Amino acid sequence: MAKQTISTDRVINKLDELLGRNDYESAEKHLLYWLGEASLVNDKRCVLLIKNELAGLYRKLSREEDALKTVEDALSLITEMGIENNVGAATTYLNCATVYKAFSKAKESIPLFEKAKSIYEKELPCDDKRFGGLYNNMALSFVDLKRFGDAYDLYNKAISVMEKTEDGMLEVAITYLNIASAKEAEIGSVESEEFVREYVEKAMKILDEYKNKDGYYAFVCEKCASVFGYFGYFLYKKELSERAKEIYERS
């Protein structure tokens, strides 16, 4: 008898629909339901995928205990499956490292980022858009650790990859804001004021001119709004929040 497997496309498509509506409660219920189904038929590949998605969801919802437990489960499952050096494992390392960074564990995140980076650079073409997320998130941990030179190197790598990929300019906008934040952290708010203005306005230009106003655009607007507010662009923060809300309501 052939081993039963779960349709991961079915799981992810429904998840995307729920996240596109900002319905996080239903998204969690959906993932936990399919986690149970995948565990029941011992579909470890699907279990790992769902653990990745849950870790990201719990991170977004600031549920530290749930997020860290899910990370622990995902890393253990990679070892159990014997897939420590493939691209799927690298994506899990990246997701888990991002969770660590989000909960003030930047030091613990770096070894996982390094594992992901080593596998990606060995297995993926240099223009693969997954490098954008890897470089950006790893750089954020370096900023927390005050390794600013390492952070800027990775931010520049992220830009060089993402500006060439389809729909990559939203990631470039995020990277510009990350660079502005890093510079302020490095030299202070007064000394970095002119530099910050330049990069914030670069990000604004991308967000204003971007054509594909879909759910991911709404997510990016929502994500960036607080950064614009932090730098004193209060009206623009409000505008981005309204753009995101309008998109979510249409979904």
Image: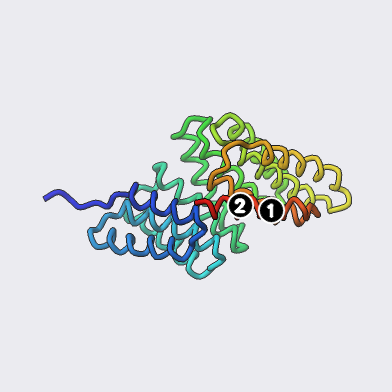
Q: Amino acid at mark 1?
A: Ala
Task: Return the residue found at the far bottom.
Answer: 65
Task: Give the number of the disc on residue 225.
Answer: 1
Q: Nearer the viewer, residue 218 or 150?
A: 218
Q: Residue at x 48, y 30 (%)?
A: 125
**Of circles 1 and 2, which is in front?**
2
In the rendered image, residue 245, in percent from the top left (x then y), is placed at 60, 55
Furthest-front residue in view?
Answer: 250
Q: State whether residue 153 is above or below residue 61.
A: above
Residue at the far right: name it: 190
Residue drawn at x 70%, y 56% is 226
Give me the C-alpha separation between circle 1 and circle 2.
Answer: 10 Å
- Of the residues shown, which amino acid type is indicated by label 2? Ala
Label annotation for residue 244: 2
In this image, 190 relative to 220: left or right? Answer: right
* Image position, residue 198 (x, y; %): 80, 40
In the rendered image, is residue 141 in sight?
no
> Hey, which quadrant is residue 33 in on the image?
bottom left
Q: Secondary structure at mark 2?
A: helix
> Is residue 241 depicted above or below 117 in this figure?
below
Question: Sequence-wise, which precedes: disc 1 or disc 2?
Answer: 1
The image quadrant that residue 206 belongs to is top right
Q: Is residue 11 left or right of residue 246?
A: left
Q: Are marks 1 and 2 in contact (CB under 8 Å)?
A: yes
Q: At which x and y percent is residue 108?
A: 56, 58
Residue at the location (74% across, 49% down)? Answer: 182
